[in-house]
Amino acid sequence: MNGNISFFGESFPLEMHKVRIVQKLNLEPIEERLSAIKKAGNNTFLLKNENIFLDMLSDSGVNAMSDNQLAAMMQSDDSYAGSKSFTKLENTARRIFGKEFILPAHQGRAAENILARMFVKPGDIVPMNYHFTTTKAHIVINGGSVAELYLKEAMNLNSANPFKGNMDTEALKNLLEKEKGKVPFVRMEAGTNLIGGQPWSLQNLREVKAICAEHDVPLVLDASLLADNLYFIKTREEAEKNKSIEDITMEISDLSDIIYFSARKLGCVRGGLMLTSDTKFLEQMQELVPLFEGFLTYGGMSIREIEAMAVGLDETMDFDMIKHGPEFIEFMVQELVRRKIPVVTPAGGLGCHLNAREFIPHVKQTEYPAGTLAAAVFIAGSVRGMERGTLSEERDKDGNEHLAEVELLRLALPRRVFTMSQIKYAVDRIHWLFENRNLIGGLKWLFEPKILRFFNGKLEANSDWQEKLAAKFRADFGDSL
């Protein structure tokens, strides 16, 4: 059941856990929020946590751990090589995914580095249902390029399609036939991060695998957001509704030649894994793990994280655990829809995604509407989100701006972190901002890195719009924060 309907008619999701450890938050006055975002160069990555009330930047490494995970960390076998803790993780991963070989990495992008070095050579093309920033960067650095084979429906931000993360299988067939010998692998991302955390169906994965097998090309799965995708398969895909989460996971794994993921998302700890049953792939990856990560039984992770990951993967098979994020996101999305605020629908995984181009249509893409909206939401509510638009792209070799297909502000909802009152607070401040959206201007660069510029670049407002927005907030709210 999605949520709970009370006697008085309000529908809301129930937390299937209780909170036993708390961390104090700070909500600063509007004037201090304005000062903080300016000091951060209007880059929410560069804000200090002490200035933030609700941190919705990411779900990576900030999900709440369970009591069992914390307990497991206290019984770790802290050995450089051959740790019993890694054997425990290895056995858990084998049971859940059915893959024979398990290799650790310190996080998901470390696995991407290894796979790109292993597979990609100059001139290669990697098809995927949608790119992720670090994935694309690793492929490009190694001389390859990315081909995004998404459905036309994926760019319809207000679609009712339940699986906008599906790959266009006809386009995949055509690409593999046309570029024979230039495709080292096909990548599917569970929950397309950059277009609203939209999932793919199990049937689509089956079709993708069949095409890959026909052309003898391996299928690589980025399973970082697998928990959300599992939820959507079970709740939205009619043919899979009576299957257990364990059975769906095993079939997904059977269809994938290599699985990798960031455990900062899947498993709720800091680390990553690569899994395969192919000896040839194992031998290639084994050569690179000690070079870039560490020995094969720790791979850059602490042994305590390894113990917690084993528990976290098991907990991911619990439907009560994996439904929390998607149901809270659905609630937030529907509250915004009710207020006619432009947001990506249907609600996906990872977080709520505001459609910046519709929220502030007067801000041109060259003025970075998603980045602008991120700064404005922080000023309005001390809520930190992440720009997922043109700022997250990179210029071409001639220095021309590559305009993103969508301009989204992602408000991530880490698992088991926020309360319902905090979600309602965020909705309220976004609603106020939408009512005053005409005050919002754009941004321009102060410092622009060449690679992954959204992480540490700095920008400034192109007018005094931020001061005007803060003044309107103070006039409307008085002494309130």
Image (cartoon, rainbow, N blue to C red):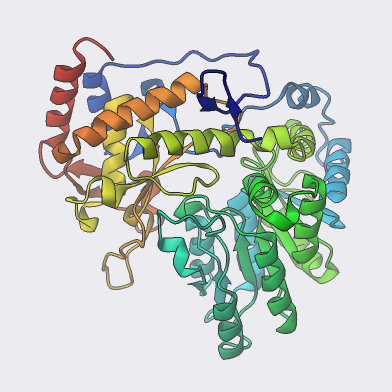
Q: Where is residue 388 in the image (x, y as percent from the top left)?
A: 39, 50
Q: Position of residue 422 (x, y in %)?
A: 45, 22
Q: Where the C terminus falls, by quadrant?
A: top left
Left or right for 132, reference 117:
left
Toward the viewer: 258 or 225?
225
Q: Where is residue 450 in the image (x, y as percent from the top left)?
A: 35, 58
Left or right for 380, reference 327:
left
Disc count in the image?
0
Residue at the spot x=60%, y=75% of the render?
169
- To which quarter of the image does residue 212 belong? bottom right
Left or right for 100, reference 287:
right
**Residue 406, above or below 87:** below
Residue at the spot x=57%, y=14% of the render?
22
Toward the viewer: 127 or 195?
195
Residue 301 visible in the displayed image: yes
Q: Where is residue 174 in the image (x, y as percent from the top left)?
A: 56, 85
Q: Where the N terminus falls, by quadrant?
A: top right
Residue at the spot x=60%, y=27% of the render?
4
Left or right for 7, reference 157:
right
Residue 413 visible in the displayed image: no
Toward the viewer: 187 or 141?
187
Residue at the spot x=74%, y=35% of the render?
312
**Residue 210, above or below 364:** below
